[in-house]
Amino acid sequence: MQQDAPDTGLFTPLEFAPTRRRQNLLVAGLLVLAGPALAWAAAAQLPGMALGWRVLAGVAVLLSCLWLARTLWRHAASSAPVLRLDGRGISGATLQPPVPWHVLEDAQLERGGLLRLQRRPDGAHPDQPQGWLRRNPARPRVSLHLLSPRQQDIAYDAIHARLDVLRLRAGTGEAASRRAARDEDAFESHLDTLVPTPWALYVVVAANVLVWAMNWAAGLSPLKPASTELFAWGANAASAVVLDGQWWRLLTAAFLHGGIVHLTFNMLGLWEAGKQLCRLLGNGQFGLVYLASALAGSAASLHYAAQNSVSVGASGAVFGVLGALVTASWHYRHLVPATNLRRLWTGLGFFIGYSLLHGFTQENVDNAAHVGGLACGMLLGLVLLAPIDRQAAASRRHKRAAAMGLLALAAVGYAVLATPVPRVWHAQMYAAQELLPEVARRFDQGFRQMALEAQRLQRGEIRQPVFLQNAERAISPACSAITEELAPLRVPRWEQTGRLVHMYLQICALTTRSLALEQAMLRRDPDLPADAAAQLAQLSGQMQLALRELADAVRRAPVPVPVPRKPARAPQAPT
């Protein structure tokens, strides 16, 4: 009995009842409601796949949502304690039978409320995954998500308070997870001492949110602003940077976003990794990584996405922060606790890999900016010196940071100068899109008046000389103004806007030539070519074809343009 005296109260029953039932019931209900929408979104992400595969993907997502909702609902509705500690060992609603104390070697609480137990393996509990769920009988898991974070910590400490006594009595010493947790706490406290506040992260997040708010206040759509509007605010485009010399767009584009969803995902991806990098490298070097990666991502985009379209977003800078955190933690792996490294690399590796794979499979994702920012960030994270490195003086850290900043600027400059000739001149294209509605209005008005004159000619109300005079008065000023406005614009003919510009110029040229030729035939000009009638008929045919093509192109135009009406009668040779 004296031997059992130290155990008094050691195995006193201790239960942890769920306190977050409402939250889990709410999440379960939301999953049931959102399941069909998520299934439809999953199917929509596979536009190139056969219908059967898309349906299968949607069904898989829907069933996953329903299964998770059922699990959450069952756990939240159960009256059993989430966790119970007593003389038999550790048990709970999802852990039956109990794990006896004498076989328990360690316990680890992970983020998200997952308690991992490690028991001594035996014949019934081998230390290897089994079944298609790959569950390890020697390493059972208990979900504590129904407990508050404070309850989870109390449960974890209670387990180790009892386990430590047993291990010390057996002479095995403190549990490995306990030592690891103490090392993590010491490391985190040291980082907090070196960098108490990650203010550089707060600054860049606030800047991104502020720019989005300014866009919204200026009238841009908060969900999906137009490309022309983003371009006016400083979006990245190869033509603007290379042809117009607007290098500042490399930086301003990194603070613009294509709507609140785009902004939210980027800031969520930046937040946790940004806090860790700020505390590891310091606020100043975090700012260097962020800005240099943003520039590198924009410069890489000039060779790919920004050749044809405008590019915006902080994703290049975000990937730079992620890459810098990976390589900086590897550089100082002898100073960072092993559990921190394992958790960090696993999370970052999955996120980076998934994001890049998603970018390569989607047409509207600027993956070149991701890769460029990631490469820049990884290099900076590998070379920059962290404040935790006691062998590196502050002056040495500053000199190396300055050198890497200059190197990054030189690399970005070289990437800009090596950019291929842009495929689209965005400033010219957007200028054309702005002019096209007014051009189409004048064009339609002039041709409508000419059609009316042609009808008067057919009814015999006017003669041919009067018709030509009135037609020239109706269409010539409009065509002259259209030619003066559109001819200087350099827009590619294969692009929709460029095709419209070319068609308006072509029809104006054909009309002007036809009227001039018909006037010369009416005056019997001595320099009139012998095949003037044939040329006029050919011009008339070309004009009719061009007008049909223009009407078809206008219906698919990227900007609202009035559909031109064909004249009732194209100019013909006088009889």
Image (cartoon, helix red, strand yellow):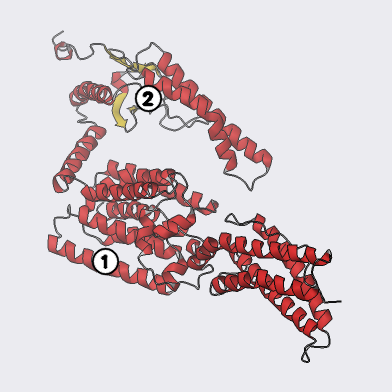
Task: Give the residue type that dot 2 points to.
Answer: Ser
Residue furthest top in the image:
1
Residue with the mark numbered 2: 143
Residue closer to the observer: 505 or 259: 505
Relative to 97, 508 lies left or right = right
Residue 465 sits in quarter? bottom right
Q: What's the mark number on residue 151?
A: none
**In this rendering, position of residue 48 left or right of residue 356:** right
Please indicate whether residue 260 sits to the left or right of residue 522 in the image: left
Label 2 sits on a secondary structure element that is strand
Amino acid beneath label 1: Met
**Percent x, y for residue 14?**
26, 13
Q: Quadrant of the N terminus?
A: top left
| Residue 552 appears in the picture as rendered | yes
Total marks placed: 2
How crowded pointer 2 is (Cα within 10 Å; few <14, some 14-19, many 20+) is rated as many
Compared across the picture, whether 462 is left or right of 554 comes to right
**C-alpha separation, residue under disc 1 versus residue under disc 2:** 45 Å
Q: Nearer the viewer, residue 172 or 29?
A: 29
Residue 404 got which mark? 1
The residue that appears at 29% across and 19% down in the rendered structure is 101
- Number of other residues with Cα within 10 Å of mark 1, as a class: few under 14, some 14 to 19, many 20 or more: some
Of the 4 image quadrants, the one containing the C terminus is bottom right
